[in-house]
Image (tube, helix red, strand yellow):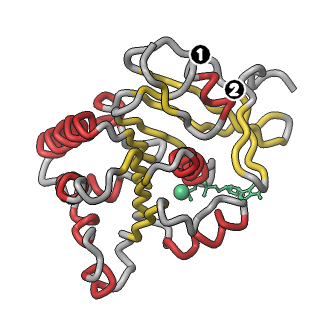
Amino acid sequence: MDERISTGIPGLDAVLNGGLIGGRVYLLKGGPGVGKTTLGMHFAMAGVAKGESVLYVTLEELAANIRADFGRMGFPVNDPRFNLIDATPTVEKYVLMKDPFETFAEGLEALRNAVVERYREVRYSRIVIDPITMLKLPAASELDYRREFLAFMKSMARLRITVLMTSELEGADVEEYLADGVVEMLTFESHGRLMRGIRVKKLRGSSFDPAIHPYEITDRGIVVYHDRLLTDH
Ligand SMILES: Nc1ncnc2c1ncn2[C@@H]1O[C@H](COP(=O)(O)OP(=O)(O)OP(=O)(O)O)[C@@H](O)[C@H]1O
Ligand SMILES: [Mg+2]
């Protein structure tokens, strides 16, 4: 069996029949507030726990807020192996200039180049891009974006880096086709209650459990109930 990469959430690894396949690019889709950033944090920290260097590129939420919120949840946000890059457009240019990843917000191609260039120095095993939307916008056309995306996948495969990209529920069709796997986080209303469900939509190279499983966001992060279906309550 191929090496499986833990998502950091045992229940989700079970739904994925053991975890993600390494060196590939995955898309995590979901509406506002469903827990995409939290899941990205679990994935990143599972690498840190194994002694790996990981890169977390935040493009919409300020890094300071991420550190504060997820530090409170018990994630080791100050571990030197956890490289959090703030590429939000609100960050002052001079701050970005100090950072070798200043070009991050310029698009997927710039991100790829930055990671490849620095690989000798920092061997990231995992990268989270949260969300991919901001790196898609600079592409001149959809064709250009597809090319950039495929080149990115190729480089990541070569360097054996596993990538998780988050995106909104709507408008990530290109990524859904191109990515090696797609996970969706959904919300439903049932008898006035909000129900959260997660499902794997696609996982190239592997079978998976296609059911929608309930999950919760707790003060320690996300728990996925792989042995329950969303309808059981
Ligand atoms: N301690 C906690 N207990 C329960 N729920 C929590 C806790 N902390 C945060 N949450 C919930 O987690 C959700 C936010 O998670 P997260 O930021 O990961 O979502 P997101 O999908 O990334 O959101 P966005 O679309 O804004 O990027 C909120 O709905 C919040 O209520
Ligand atoms: Mg988020």
Contact between marks 1 and 2 (CB within 8 A): the answer is: yes
Percent across and percent down for residue 95 are 33, 84
Q: Quadrant of residue 25?
A: top left
Percent across and percent down for residue 231 are 78, 22
Percent across and percent down for residue 141 are 13, 48
The disc placed on residue 209 is 1
Alpha-carbon span between mark 1 and mark 2: 9 Å
Percent across and percent down for residue 60 are 44, 65
Does residue 143 lie above or below 83 as drawn?
A: above
Q: Quadrant of residue 101?
A: bottom left
Q: Residues within 10 Å of mark 1 (few under 14, many from 20)?
A: some
The disc placed on residue 213 is 2
- Camera-side residue of 171 and 59: 59
Q: Is mark 2 within 8 Å of ligand 1?
A: no
What residue appears at the point 31 percent right and 36 percent down from the top-left corner? 160
In the displayed structure image, the side of residue 171 where residue 214 appears, left or right: right
Q: What amino acid does circle 2 point to?
A: His
- Camera-side residue of 34 and 158: 158
What kind of element bears circle 2?
Answer: strand
In the displayed structure image, the side of residue 106 where residue 186 appears, left or right: right
What residue appears at the point 43 percent right and 54 percent down from the top-left corner? 53
What residue appears at the point 48 percent right and 40 percent down from the top-left corner? 28
Q: Quadrant of ligand 1?
A: bottom right
Does residue 192 lie above or below 129 as drawn?
A: above
Locate the N terminus and report the quarter of the image it occupies. top left
- Camera-side residue of 8 and 219: 8
Q: What amino acid does circle 1 point to?
A: Asp
Q: Residues within 10 Å of mark 2 (few under 14, many from 20)?
A: many
The disc placed on residue 19 is none
